[in-house]
Image (spheres, helix red, strand yellow):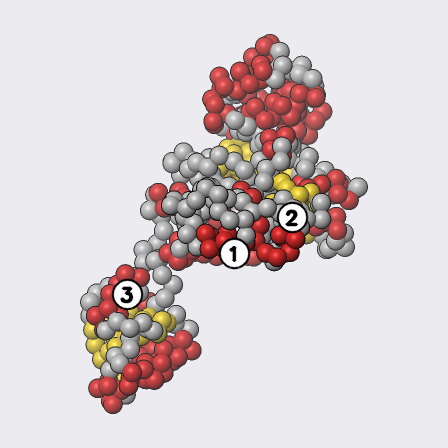
Amino acid sequence: MEIFVNWALNSPPCLRALSGRLSSSSCQEREKEGVSSHTFDMPNTPKNPSKTCERNVALAKKIQARIYKGTRDFLPEQMIKRNYVINIIKNIFEKYGFEPLETPTLELWETLSGKYGEEADRLTYRFIDRGDREVGLRYDLTVPLSRVMAMYPNLPKPFRRYQIQPVWRADKPQKGRFREFYQCDIDIVGSPSMVAEAEIIAISHEILSELNFKDFVIKINNRKILSGLIEVCGVAPEKEIDIYRSMDKLDKVGIDGVKSELEERGIDDTAISRLVDILQIEGNNREKMDQTQTLLANSEIGKRGIEEMREVFEYLSAYQVPEQHILFDLYMARGLDYYTGPIFETVVTKPRIGSLTGGGRYDTLIGMFSGQDIPATGSSVGLERTIAVMEELNMFPPHLSTSTRVLVTVFDETSLAYSLRIANTLREAGINTDLYSGSSKLRGQFGLANDKGIPIVVIAGPDEQAEGKANIKNMRSGEQFTVSIDELVPQIKHILSE
């Protein structure tokens, strides 16, 4: 099913930037091509406006200001919080030796299609460009990475990359789920070792711990184990992906819902019952692995999966990831088709919002582009859900409303040059400083600092200028005092360090 970019389709031709067979042609060129203008449904405007581009431009000035559902504007206070989280994630990625990569927003449809599964294909934004090429908006960052590895085969391996970019999905918007959202990915390409999995899981743990998460668990499973369980339950191999997709909906529909969906997919009742009984094995991580290994005694692929799991848990112990934060979860399947080995995702105890991180091994995906399989594994941190949980639980540090540390006021035109000199001095010292450029008197300037949460205000009027001094006001404590220009930087740094 083709899903078109609504904001573009509903725009008049002269305003369109992208969609269908659209381009940035001038109004005259579009009319020469015989493309008729679209009408607008707007308050107090005619239903059939003139078909000239000039009329459409005039009407556009009156259009209701709104955005596409499932997307958002991020105002400065929100961006500061987002950058706080992104910087922590990025610093930890780089601490472990990962390097940055970016890929285009648009990919050829052949790159995206058939890589994720039928449901994901339906959720991918897809359209035709003016050159009759089928293209799509990025659905995730893993498939574009696989395409990159095929195009640049000489990249040194193991190749360790991180990527922080938006992706798009034509999903139903709800709490923690959007149509445009950021993923923060790390991947290791070219390593078959389970050390790669353990390292990525350890990184996920460190990121959440650094962000001050306490009640979370990283669920770990293995597609080979699931293949073995399906095999011993007597289910036909061609039904394997159907079972994964049904199991992946456990949190949404519950165990009865999973059973019903398996029945709808044509799975035998006896096989369903046996599979559910096996998946409900209880005990600690080691006990569940022991029981599962016994059940998989006659499945070669299942036994390989158990061996891999034991290796991952051993390495996680070496990484000193606490046992209470990792869980061998047989029910966890991950819905994407390309996983081939260990899979993992992180959930919080509260609020109920879905996984914050997720990933796994995909040893055959790159081969779909290069013709040669290359072992690879990776994980993604869901930025939007992480921030949503942090906001709901009030986890952000205080005074994170602005990155500006100082507002330098302007008393009047005669003291503007002096205020500018002060602002430059503070900026050169590495202090984020705003020089007031509005028309308000001092009272209004203090009000601006208060509204934005700027912690320090510097006042420098004619008297201070004559004496080579300035007044410092600590907006948090209310304290105000006068210092010489030479003392200004150390005094402000002292206040900010408190």
Mark 3 belongs to which amino acid? Answer: Leu
Mark 2 or 1 closer to N-term? 2
Judged from the image, the secondary structure of the residue bearing numbered disc 3 is helix
Residue shown at 48%/47% (left/top)?
A: 49
The answer to whether residue 78 shows anywhere in this view is yes
| Label 2 to label 3: alpha-carbon separation | 52 Å
Tell me the number on the disc at residue 448. Answer: 3
What residue is shown with label 1?
A: 54
Q: Above or below — where is 90 with respect to 449?
A: above
| Label 1 to label 3: alpha-carbon separation | 40 Å
Residue shown at 55%/24% (left/top)?
A: 247
The answer to whether residue 161 shows anywhere in this view is no
Percent across and percent down for residue 131 are 71, 48
Count of picture labels: 3
Viewer-proximal residue among 250 and 216: 250
Percent across and percent down for residue 25 are 63, 56
Viewer-proximal residue among 24 and 324: 24
What residue is shown with label 2?
A: 34
Mark 2 or 3 closer to N-term? 2
